[in-house]
């Protein structure tokens, strides 16, 4: 590939923040479509009628492309089909390709290979770092970790890293705190999608909802929980607590939903698991991260969600 084309692709990737699995799936799929059908493309013709999704995009289509390059890892369980902004990414990429005025099929093949290299970089992305500092409180250590997730989220498009990490940290904590129970875990994209599930974690008649941006949708879910005789709990980041309480009040549910700071929830339980012994804090964190990484391995396709304790 000539340097000019590589430079243009890099600029497009950076401008559109094509770093997450969903957006990578979109551009890879469209690259193959362009390679097989030629340019120019019509963006409107690449939207499935009725569903508002990118035509032909899905796990199977994306994996077939990856298999051509010997990649067996799953890029996205939904193949980018349900990612936020997929249509926007597709339209922007179609416009970008059309503006290149490329005629030769081999050039389109080079573009596909360029994106394959970005996919490989995605799979080799570094995990988050949980830095254990004996001088810091457990809540501050968790806050530092979530700050990393928020920063990566702002630099990427289509992947809500903070919510995914928080969900699986809570899941790992629940496993450690209640080994006698079977905790059901779900991939974050499944949890984030509109679904019939009562909440992120169902423990007897208590239902836990994990959210970093409380909205009316989660309050409606809580209303459904209450109507079914269950007790809803919302775990959110510090800034989201007052927002969730306000929404609950507006819905006439003030005092009926337990709304908690997830960082405090995690820190308090970690202290209990460590029996409040300073000497056990790091060991307890190691157990949490080990369990968390196992959950991510079993339920997610993005290896960069892993956490390393240092």
Image: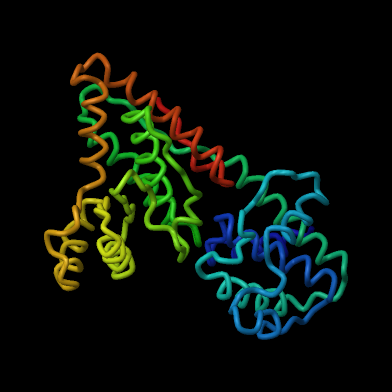
Q: Quadrant of residue 77?
A: bottom right
Is 191 on the left-hand or right-hand side of 43?
Answer: left
Q: Quadrant of residue 252?
A: bottom left
Numbered-mark total: 0
| Residue 155 seen in render | no
x then y, percent, for residue 161:
43, 51
Q: Nearer the viewer, residue 294 or 159?
A: 294
Q: Residue drawn 39% across and 35% down?
A: 172
Q: Residue drawn 19% across and 72% down?
A: 251
Position of residue 299 relative to residue 137, above or below, is: below
Is 55 on the left-hand or right-hand side of 232?
Answer: right
Q: Quadrant of residue 1?
A: bottom right
Q: Nearer the viewer, residue 268 or 95?
A: 268
Is 217 on the left-hand or right-hand side of 92?
Answer: left
Q: Residue drawn 33% across and 46% down?
A: 147
x then y, percent, for residue 71:
75, 45
The colour scheme used to paint the residues is: rainbow
Q: Nearer the viewer, residue 27 or 230?
A: 230
What residue occupies the far left of the structure in this picture?
Answer: 255
What residue occupies the far top of the structure in this picture?
Answer: 279
Q: Nearer the viewer, residue 247 or 55?
A: 247
| Residue 39 seen in render | yes
x then y, percent, for residue 87:
58, 75
x then y, percent, for residue 45:
70, 84
Quarter of the image with the C terminus in it: top left
Is 36 on the left-hand or right-hand side of 282?
Answer: right
What residue occupies the far front of the structure in this picture?
Answer: 229
Position of residue 34 relative to residue 188, above or below, is: below
């Amino acid at each position: 590939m000539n340097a000019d084309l590589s430079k243009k692709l890099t600029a497009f990737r950076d401008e559109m923040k094509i770093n997450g699995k969903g957006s990578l799936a979109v551009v890879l799929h469209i690259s193959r479509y362009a390679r097989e059908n030629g340019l120019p493309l019509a963006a409107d013709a690449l939207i499935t009628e009725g569903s508002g999704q990118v035509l032909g995009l899905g796990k199977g289509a994306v994996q077939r492309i990856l298999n051509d390059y010997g990649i067996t890892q799953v890029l996205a369980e939904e193949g980018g089909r349900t990612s936020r902004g997929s249509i926007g990414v597709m339209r922007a990429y179609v416009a970008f390709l059309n503006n290149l005025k490329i005629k030769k099929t081999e050039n389109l093949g080079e573009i596909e290979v360029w994106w394959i290299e970005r996919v490989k970089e995605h799979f080799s992305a570094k995990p988050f770092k949980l830095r254990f500092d004996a001088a810091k409180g457990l809540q501050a250590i968790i806050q530092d970790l979530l700050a990393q997730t928020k920063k990566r989220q702002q630099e990427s498009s289509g992947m809500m890293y903070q919510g995914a990490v928080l969900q699986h940290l809570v899941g790992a904590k629940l496993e450690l705190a209640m080994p006698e129970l079977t905790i059901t875990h779900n991939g974050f994209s499944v949890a984030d999608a509109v679904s019939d599930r009562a909440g992120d974690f169902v423990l007897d008649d208590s239902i836990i909802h994990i959210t970093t941006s409380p909205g009316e949708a989660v309050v409606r879910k809580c209303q459904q929980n209450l109507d079914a005789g269950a007790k809803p709990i919302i775990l959110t980041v510090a800034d989201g607590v007052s927002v969730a309480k306000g929404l609950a009040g507006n819905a006439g549910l003030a005092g009926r939903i337990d709304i908690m700071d997830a960082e405090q929830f995690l820190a308090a339980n970690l202290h209990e698991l460590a029996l409040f012994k300073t000497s056990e804090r790091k060991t307890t964190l190691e157990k949490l991260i080990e369990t968390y990484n196992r959950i991510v391995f079993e339920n997610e396709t993005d290896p960069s969600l892993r956490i390393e304790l240092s």
